[in-house]
Amino acid sequence: MNNRIILLLLLWIAVGTACRKTEYTTIAEPAYLRIFNNLDYNITVDNKEAPQPFLTYLMDPELDADGIPVSAKATGDFLDKRATWARPYPDAVNTTLYQTEYPGSAKVLAGPVLNGYDLSSWAQMPAGKHRIMFVSRPLSPVPFFQLPKDLRSQIIIDTVMDFGSREVYTMHVLEKDWNTKQPGIYVRKETFIHQPFSDSLVYVNFYNLSSGGFFEKGVVRGSDATFNLKIRDTMNVYYSLSKVNNSNLMQPVAGHTGVLMAAVVRSHEPAVHPYYSFPLFPDTAASRIYTGRAAQTFTFLSPAYTYENNPFVQYMTESNGRFTELRVGPANINGFAAFPLVADFLTGMVVTIRSGVYFNRSFATVNTVEYVNGKFYLMTIQRKYEPPVY
């Protein structure tokens, strides 16, 4: 074999290797981690020296002699502000550079289906103690470790954490105090994988993860102020279920209007809050396969009021934080004033997907509603379901 043939063969191997799909090895004792960036503020003349709320996550970083990161065992780069809805599965065709969560579309070993729950939106990592670091980085398409040294120096969080084997963790970077703007992390060890939830019920729990002092001094910007999204540090939440007809109008489901669920208290304590539930098929006319187009509304009221004696429903902007509503459901619903959060485009918190021989089949989910500094966010966790049959 002459030198030219050998060279062509080596080039062919190199090209094939570069285009080959990466094969990931399994982790013997994994933990599962998902990260959201809740830092959300405008850079102005008054706070121009504050770190940019655009981050890089590093696990077990290696630092140079000046304490600047030069590599890490795991990196989550371009971590932007979180999306309103954290989907129950990764967006497989997402090619966006900026990420609304970690792992997002990063090429990492994703979590499996564990105890019937799809953990593909969580990244696997070795269980045990790890150094966790978040670095503020510039808004640019340059990967973190290719940035100049001075642009890798704004370390805003540096801590060590211990992750249990086969446990599921949700981590938030958030503002601890409204006055100081000091960022910190909040890590919740989730319990849904250990709880005996029914397949016929939809579960939801609630958190207020706002900064200390936000209600007293915070400002809700833009159109969100119209819906009075500045709530007090203690609220009660009620749920109401609705069908959505062909005219995109909501129709109440009998027996599921204004049902008290929970008290929501502002706190950064990492304990898991209780889950509350409502039926997957609350409408007796539903087929028990597909629930039909549906929406869920959550009414937040100061403990001084109840759903029945709510005096603010027509005057949302005048309630001074004592009332607001969050609607989860399809887009373009008519005649309803609540703040809308679009999740599943047919059924809101319920996942409706092609499964088995059914074009639309509805499945119960486990959900977390988080309120952070004037904004509502939803994280939906999907159950394992039968793949479609064609």
Image (cartoon, rainbow, N blue to C red):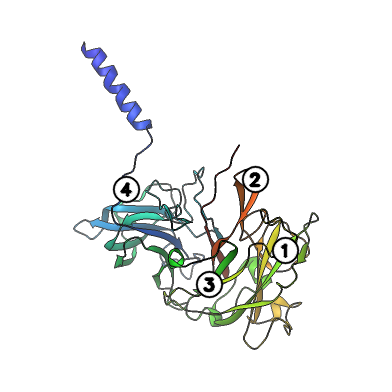
Q: Nearer the viewer, mark 4 or mark 1?
A: 1
Q: Amino acid at mark 1?
A: Asp
Rounded to the nearest angstrom, the CA distance separating label 2 from label 1 is 19 Å
Relative depth, front residue between 328 and 8: 328
Camera sees residue 242: yes
Q: Indicate the quadrant where residue 191 lies.
A: bottom left
Point out residue 97 in the picture as x, y percentages from the top left corner.
Answer: 46, 47
Q: SS class of the residue under badge 1?
A: loop
Q: SS class of the residue under badge 4?
A: loop
Whether 337 is drawn above or below 313: the answer is: above
Q: Dot 4 surroundings within 10 Å: few (below 14), some, or many (20 or more)?
A: few
Is residue 275 rendered to the left or right of residue 145? right
Q: SS class of the residue under badge 2?
A: strand
The residue at 31%/64% (across/down) is 163
Q: Dot 1 surroundings within 10 Å: few (below 14), some, or many (20 or more)?
A: some
Point out the tag, 3 or 2, that comes first from the N-terminus: 3
Point out the tag, 4 or 1, that comes first from the N-terminus: 4
Q: Which residue is mark 3?
A: 275
Point out the tag, 3 or 4, that comes first from the N-terminus: 4
Q: SS class of the residue under badge 3?
A: loop
Q: Dot 2 surroundings within 10 Å: few (below 14), some, or many (20 or more)?
A: some
Point out residue 337 in the picture as x, y percentages from the top left corner.
Answer: 73, 68
Q: Which residue is mark 1?
A: 283
Q: Which residue is mark 4?
A: 26
Whether 249 is drawn above or below 214: the answer is: above
Q: Amino acid at mark 3?
A: Tyr
Point out the tag, 2 or 4, that comes first from the N-terminus: 4
Q: Which residue is mark 2?
A: 358
Rounded to the nearest angstrom, the CA distance separating label 2 from label 4 is 34 Å
Q: Indicate the quadrant where residue 32 lies.
A: bottom left
